[in-house]
Each structure stands twice: as C-alpha cells, then as structure tokens.
Image (cartoon, helix red, strand yellow):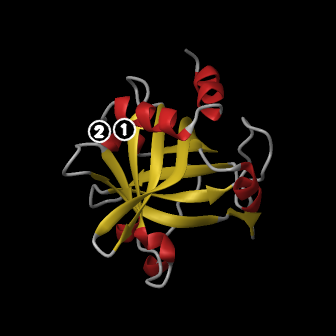
Amino acid sequence: MSAAAVRDTLLRASNPELARALAAGRTFEPGALAGWTYHGTSLGLPAWLERLTWKTFAKAFVRDPDTKVRGWNIRCEQATPPTWRPRTRAGAPVTFGHFAVVTDATSGSVLLDYGQGGNRRVDPVGAVRDPLVALDDAAHLLLGRSLVAVAGRTIATPSFFLLERGSRVAHIARPPRAR
C-alpha cells in the first residue's frame, strides 16, 4: 500500500483502529530518523480541535555530536495534505517542542521524550511522551501517539499522528535551554 493510501486509510480510522495500528507497528532503530524531516498529519482529534491547533506539521531529527538523536516540531502553513510548507519567522522555520529520541525500556519502541528535549522548564510540552512505531520495513512511514506524564503516571490522549519521510534536514534548531 502506498504512503498516500495508508494516510487516507488512517485519516478515516477511529481511535480504537489507530490504537490497534500502533500496537501492530514495528520497532526500529532511532538512528534511522537522524538527518530527516518527516511530514506529519494529526489523527484522532475532533475537527473543531484541529481547527484551533493544526492538521499538518513536520518533525526534524538530527544526531548530535554526543551520538544522541534529538528533534523538534516545525509549524506548517495549514493546507490540505500532502502540502507541508513551514511557517517562517525572520527567514527561519518556526520550531517548538524539542525532544530526545530514546528507546522505551518497557516496550523497546522509539519514544520521543519532550522532558529531555531542552524545552523551557515552565513549558507544559515537557510532559509529552510520543511512542513511535514503523508501518514499513524502512521506517519511512511512522505512527505515533501523544501521551502525557503526570505525577508518575502516563495518560493517553486522543492524539495520534502519521509521519512520512520527507527531505533532509535543512535547518538545525537549538532547544530553548541550549540557546
């Protein structure tokens, strides 16, 4: 099935169907993400909430000199997918929500850990944890879900997302606490 066909299927999927697809996904090496920008499509949220937030976004991944893979979100102009055009400010993409890419000790899956991403201490995004699985053998098509860590517990949100490998990373963003 092509990436566009998978996207179309997942866009129509219910949250229980998305949860089953996530559970059936494949683990992969975090290093497979390094150097790539992935085009993101929000799944599972009510349309009214997407209108207040976003439907499309991007995530960029790089390997730092210490060999750790990290990444960040890129705000995109809201257009009908598959258009992912970054919003810019002063000629640079608008970035937010930095994360470390780690392997979850329990499941062995890739986890985007915003608590280790260098975000400002008061930024609530630091509580977000996104488990991520591959829907193909090459980790070009990924499915994730946003979880929130609160008081030692992890709470599932209704927010799922699809990531499709796009282009090489063209702009390296620094986390707010690293500036």
Which amino acid type is marked by label 1? Ala
Q: Position of residue 100 (x, y in %)?
A: 36, 60
The residue tagged 2 is 29
Q: Nearer the viewer, residue 164 or 25?
A: 25
C-alpha span from label 1 to label 2: 6 Å
Which amino acid type is marked by label 2? Glu
Q: Secondary structure at mark 2?
A: loop
Query: Which quadrant of the structure image shows residue 114?
Result: bottom left
Q: Nearer the viewer, residue 135 or 34?
A: 135
Q: Position of residue 125 (x, y in %)?
A: 49, 70
Above or below: residue 109 compared with residue 146: above
Tell me, yes or no, whether the two marked residues, 1 and 2, touch with CB atoms within 8 Å. Answer: yes
Task: Give the residue drawn at x 57%, y 36%.
Answer: 14
Q: Secondary structure at mark 1?
A: helix
Left or right, 108 with respect to 116, comes to left
Task: Give the residue drawn at x 42%, y 62%.
Answer: 99
Left or right, 3 with respect to 121, comes to right
Task: Looking at this view, name the residue that lies furthest to the top.
Answer: 1
- Residue 32 numbered tag: 1
Above or below: residue 115 compared with residue 85: below
